[in-house]
Image (spheres, helix red, strand yellow):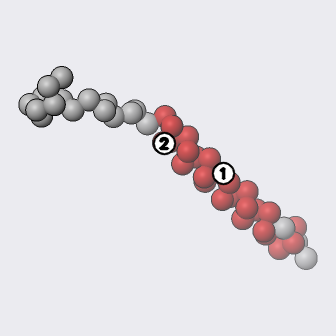
């Protein structure tokens, strides 16, 4: 048996963790939208 066929679950778990980490990093680094309402919304700010 090859190493990959013996340890496929380890590789799958590591891949899932890596993809999840990349998604979190992208979401954390994405520019935050302003929570301010903008112009002519009637919020009296």
Residue 13, above or below 43: below
Residue beneath the point at 48% across and 42% down? 27
Task: Please give the label number shown on residue 27.
Answer: 2
Q: Quadrant of the N terminus?
A: bottom right
- x then y, percent, for residue 16: 66, 59
Up the image or down, 38 lies above or below 18; here it is above
Quadrant (top left, top right, bottom left, bottom right) of the C terminus: top left
The picture places residue 15, in percent across and down from the top left corner, at 68, 58
In the rendered image, the vertical position of residue 28 relative to residue 22, given as above or below:
above
Closest to the camera, between mark 1 and mark 2, is: 2
Where is mark 1, residue-wise? Answer: 18
Lateral position of residue 35 relative to residue 9, left or right: left
Label 1 crowd (10 A; few <14 / some 14-19 / many >=20): few
Identify the mark at residue 33; answer none if there is no mark: none
The mark that comes first in sequence, 1 or 2, is 1
Quick check: 38 left or right of 17?
left
Label 2 residue SS:
helix
Q: Is residue 29 above or below residue 13?
A: above
Residue shown at 21% from the left, 32% from the top? 37
| Place of residue 25 in the rendered image (x, y in percent of width and height, measured from the top left) | 55, 40
Extreme residue in the top direction: 45
Q: Secondary structure at mark 1?
A: helix
Q: Nearer the viewer, residue 34 or 8?
A: 34
- State the residue at coordinates (14%, 25%): 44
**Residue most toward the right?**
1
Q: Nearer the viewer, residue 31 or 8?
A: 31
Instruction: Indicate left or right for 22 with 35 as reference.
Output: right
Q: How many marks overall?
A: 2
The answer for how far apart the CA atoms under marks 1 and 2 are is 14 Å
Residue nearest the observer in this picture, 45 or 9:
45
């Amino acid at each position: 048996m090859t190493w990959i066929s013996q340890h496929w679950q380890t590789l799958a778990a590591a891949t899932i963790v890596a993809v999840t980490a990349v998604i979190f990093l992208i979401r954390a680094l994405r520019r935050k939208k302003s929570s301010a309402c903008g112009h002519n919304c009637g919020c009296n700010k």
